[in-house]
Structure formats: C-alpha cells, structure tokens
Image: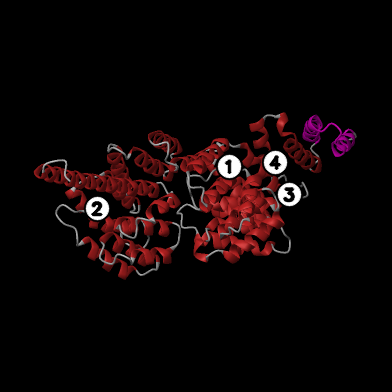
C-alpha cells in the first residue's frame, strides 16, 4: 500500500538517485583531491630528502598511479637501492616519467647510450601545453651522472617556453651548477624560484649551497637561515648550517644544528650516520665513535662508518685503533668511493709506527693523485706538518717544498721558513740555505729568516767558529729584535756564536762585549764565565 501518489513517488525516487549520484561524485572528488594532496606531500618529503616518509605515502598508491610509482622509484634510487628502483620504473613502460626514471638507472649502470636514447624518446613526447616530458628527461640528466647538463638546460628552456614554474627554475639552476662557469645562471634561477609561492625555503637552501661552494660562509649562513625560517619543517638547511658553522670553527653551533636536522629528518640510518659525521667535524670525537659503534651493534654497517671512527681515533691519538678501523674501511669500501683524505689520514697513521713509516709516502701520493683540486698547497702543507710531528724531517722538508712550488696565494713566509728549518733539522744544510735565502728575499722585514739563515750558515760554513761566516746574519737579526727578552734561547745561540768567533780571532773587546751579552740572558753560562776569566789575562 502506497501512502503517496505514484507520480510523487517517482519524482522522489528520481531526486534521491540524483542526490546519491551527486554525493558519489562529491566523495570521489574529495578522494581524488585527498590522493593528489597526499602525493604532493610525498613529493615535498622527497625534495627534503625524507625518503622513508615519502615511501610510506607512495607505496600504497604506486599500484594505480604512475606518478606515485615514479617518485617511489626515485626514493629507492636516492637510498642506493638501484635494482629495486629499476623494477619499480618498469611497471609503467608507457609512462614518460617512469621511462625517465629508468634512464636514471641506466646512467647508474654506466649505460649512457641507452639512457640518452630513452630520454630523447621521452622528451619528444612533449606537447604545446605539456612540458613535463621535457622536465622528466632533463631531471634524469641533472640528478644523475653521465649525461650532458647542457642538454638538460636546453630541455628546461623549452619547458619554460610553455610555462615558468618554481620547479623548473630550481631544476635548471641545479643543471647550471654542473656546468663550469654556470654559477651565475644557477643563482639567477634560484632567485626567480624564491619569488614563487612555496619555493622560498628550497630556493634559499640552494643559494646557500652556492655561497658555501664559493667558501663565502657568511652569505651561506644567511641563506640557510632564511631557508629554515621559510619552512620550519625543512631539515636540509640545518644540515647545511652544521657544515657551514664547522667551516668557520663554531663547533657548538654546528652540533646544535645537526641535532635539529636529526629531529626533523626521518632518523634513518643515513641520517644518524650524518649526525655522527658532524659530531666528528665538530670535534666531538668520542661521541662520534660511540654513535657509530651503537649503530654497528644494531646490525647497521656501511664502510664509511669506519672512516668516521678511524678519523676520530686519529684525532684522539688512538693510533693503533685508528689504523685497525681504517684497515676495515679500505677492505669494505668500494675503491671508487675512497676519497683523497682517506689516503692522507692513513699515511699519518703509518708515520706513527716505526715499522710502517716507510709506507707513509706511498699513501700520501695516492691521496694526491686522487685529489682533483687545482690548488693542492693545503694538502701538501697538511702532509708536511704530519711528517714534522713524526720527526721525519727530510720528508717534511720535501712536502713543504712542494707547497712552495705550487705558487698558490696561500703560500706564506711560514712555508719557506718551515721548509728551511726541516732541512736544517735533517742535517741537510745545503738544501736549507736556498729556502731561507728565498724567505729573506720575499719577506726582508721578517727577522726569523735572518736568524735561521745565520744558524744554518754556522753549521754549513763555520762549525769551528773560525771564519765568522754567520756574523753578519746574526747581527742583522739582533738589530731587528733589540734584545727582546721573549726570545731568550735565540739570543743565547746568537751571542754564543759571536762570542766564540771573536774569542777564536783573539778580539778581546768584541769577546768581552758578546760574553757579557750572553750572561745577560744566561747568568750562569759556564763557557762565557770561563772565556771572560781567560780574556782578563790577555794583554
């Protein structure tokens, strides 16, 4: 029995069906909007190197969404799971993004020809209003090694002819950074990106990296600070701030910022290793060792963890333990990932043991050969200082000489001085002489050069105090320092030499003068007292 007329029931059923349809469409739209927003969150996590957070969002979506699958593959690539990334990208063989991802894998596999063939195919799919294939292809070159970044720049420019976005400005800036002399163009594009909504944090972080690479740490710090204030959830600037503060020797601030980075990061193994690495850079050597050992005890083991442990033990003068750690590192690490400093520090350890000191030079040479920097003066100086500390004076002198021969802007009087002094301590007075003369030539107002040239001349040409070969040089030095009481030992050496020369030459007045000067600095000097007693008998 119907309570309402039949036509009224029909109209109501029709209205209800329409309402149901509208609600289904609404819920479907909300679901799609929610999914789209979720993917954007994952992409932001990816940009901030929070790969585990991104993967949690992307994994359930990747089965039906090619874009989610693409970013899932990128996350696996970023965490060095190349084989897994390859299998992910292969799930969508007709999708431009995933094919570009597969090209990244080919680059990792050193299959450059195959990678570029695939990227050319992807980039050709761009349309008048769809620039994304160009960006996917260009990104594959920019964020891997093996392709030509100039090609990436051209593809980005074509994409920008269609639309200029913050993502494109960031990406082309990153591509320019891979081109020699491209820093200016990179900065310009990061500045454009900064003006676009939502890109302030990432753009300032990228600009900070440019300043950091240029060793302008104050400007880098300023940009990193703006990056973190633009998005407090971005962990990247805190890691960069930690590095920059380390460079300007503000170690406490370095440690504070790496702790903030760890707080905002996914706290993955790599994040914790980064934390331990910065503890080392901040001179918290004991804490760095403890953190790495903690991770190893939990079953986490990556070769470069032993590098941090070994470097820290070297700084703590735990030489036997440091060598053991570095031996583990070399045994486990891919030779292609060994850095110059690994060989340099290992050489320092070899210097600490008399049975291995002869092997140190070979390790140092390996480090030099793998160092691609144009100016190697700093590393030569570092090796020279290590040899000096080990009292390997001949080796120290040769490394200081190599430092000088670079003619780098950082070469200073101290390098010439140390080179000459090391030859002096090695007993090679002939080699010491030109180094000390060169120091005086370049720095004629520096007294130290005359003192050590005088000492060297005395050893080389007048060990018996007979010909007075070093008299003029000692007097030159004395005239420049005016009996400075802080240089007591040096004055004793100078006045001792001058006293003996004049004594040998029977010059009573000068012997009296210099013996008296010597006693001013060393009142109980036995030889001076004996000589004064003797010359008192001279007529």
Separation of disc 4 and disc 1 at Cα?
Answer: 49 Å
Tag 2 residue: 156
The mark nearer the N terminus, 2 or 1, is: 2
Q: Position of residue 102 (x, y in %)?
A: 33, 65
Crowding near pointer 4: few (<14 within 10 Å), some, many (20+)? many
Q: Quadrant of the C terminus?
A: top right
Contact (CB < 8 A) between labels 3 and 4? no
Closest to the camera, between mark 4 and mark 2, is 2
The mark nearer the N terminus, 3 or 2, is: 2
Query: Residue 282 — which label?
Result: 1
Q: Is any part of residue 387 visible from this angle? A: yes
Contact (CB < 8 A) between labels 4 and 1? no
Magenta residues (range) = 508-536
Query: Residue 209 — which label?
Result: none
Tag 4 residue: 471
Separation of disc 3 and disc 2 at Cα?
Answer: 74 Å
């Amino acid at each position: 029995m119907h309570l309402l007329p039949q036509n009224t029931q029909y109209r109501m059923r029709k209205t209800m069906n329409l309402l149901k349809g509208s609600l289904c469409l609404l819920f479907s739209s909300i679901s799609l909007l929610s999914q789209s927003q979720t993917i954007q969150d994952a992409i932001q996590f990816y940009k901030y190197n929070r790969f585990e957070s991104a993967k949690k969002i992307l994994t359930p979506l990747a089965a039906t969404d090619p874009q989610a699958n693409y970013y899932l593959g990128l996350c696996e690539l970023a965490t060095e799971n190349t084989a897994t990334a390859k299998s992910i990208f292969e799930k969508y063989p007709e999708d431009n993004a995933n094919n570009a991802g597969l090209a990244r894998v080919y680059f990792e596999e050193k299959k450059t020809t195959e990678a570029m063939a695939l990227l050319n195919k992807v980039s050709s799919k761009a349309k008048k209003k769809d620039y994304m294939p160009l960006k996917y292809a260009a990104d594959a070159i920019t964020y891997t090694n093996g392709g030509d970044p100039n090609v990436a720049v051209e593809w980005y420019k074509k994409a920008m002819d269609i639309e200029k976005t913050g993502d494109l400005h960031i990406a082309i800036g990153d591509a320019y950074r891979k081109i020699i002399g491209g820093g200016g163009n990179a900065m310009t594009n990061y500045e454009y990106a900064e003006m676009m909504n939502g890109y302030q944090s990432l753009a300032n972080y990228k600009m900070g990296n440019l300043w950091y690479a240029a060793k302008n740490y104050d400007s880098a710090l300023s940009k990193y600070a703006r990056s973190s204030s633009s998005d407090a959830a971005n962990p990247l600037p805190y890691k960069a701030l930690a590095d920059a503060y380390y460079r300007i020797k503000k170690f406490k601030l370095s440690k504070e910022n790496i702790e903030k980075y760890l707080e905002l990061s996914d706290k993955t193994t790599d994040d914790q290793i980064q934390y331990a690495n910065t503890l080392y850079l901040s001179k918290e050597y004991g804490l760095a060792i403890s953190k790495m050992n903690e991770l190893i005890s939990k079953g986490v083991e990556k070769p470069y963890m032993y590098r941090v442990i070994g470097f820290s033990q070297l700084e703590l003068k735990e030489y036997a333990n440091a060598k053991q750690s570095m031996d583990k590192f070399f045994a486990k690490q891919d030779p292609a990932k060994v850095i110059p400093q690994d060989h340099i520090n290992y050489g320092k350890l070899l210097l600490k043991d008399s049975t291995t000191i002869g092997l140190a030079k070979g390790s140092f040479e390996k480090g030099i050969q793998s160092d691609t920097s144009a100016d190697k003066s700093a590393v030569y100086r570092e090796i020279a200082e290590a040899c000096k500390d080990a009292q390997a004076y001949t080796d120290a002198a040769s490394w200081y000489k190599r430092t000088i021969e670079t003619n780098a802007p950082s070469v200073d009087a101290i390098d010439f001085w140390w080179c000459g002094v090391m030859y002096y301590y090695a007993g090679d007075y002939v080699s010491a002489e030109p180094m000390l003369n060169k120091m005086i030539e370049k720095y004629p107002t520096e007294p130290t050069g005359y003192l050590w040239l005088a000492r060297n001349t005395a050893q080389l040409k007048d060990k018996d105090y007979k010909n007075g070969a070093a008299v003029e040089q000692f007097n030159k030095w004395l005239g420049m320092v005016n009996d400075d009481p802080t240089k007591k030992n040096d004055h004793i050496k100078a006045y001792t030499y001058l006293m003996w020369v004049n004594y040998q030459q029977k010059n009573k007045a000068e012997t009296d003068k210099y013996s008296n000067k010597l006693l001013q600095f060393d009142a109980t000097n036995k030889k001076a007292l004996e000589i004064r007693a003797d010359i008192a008998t001279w007529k």
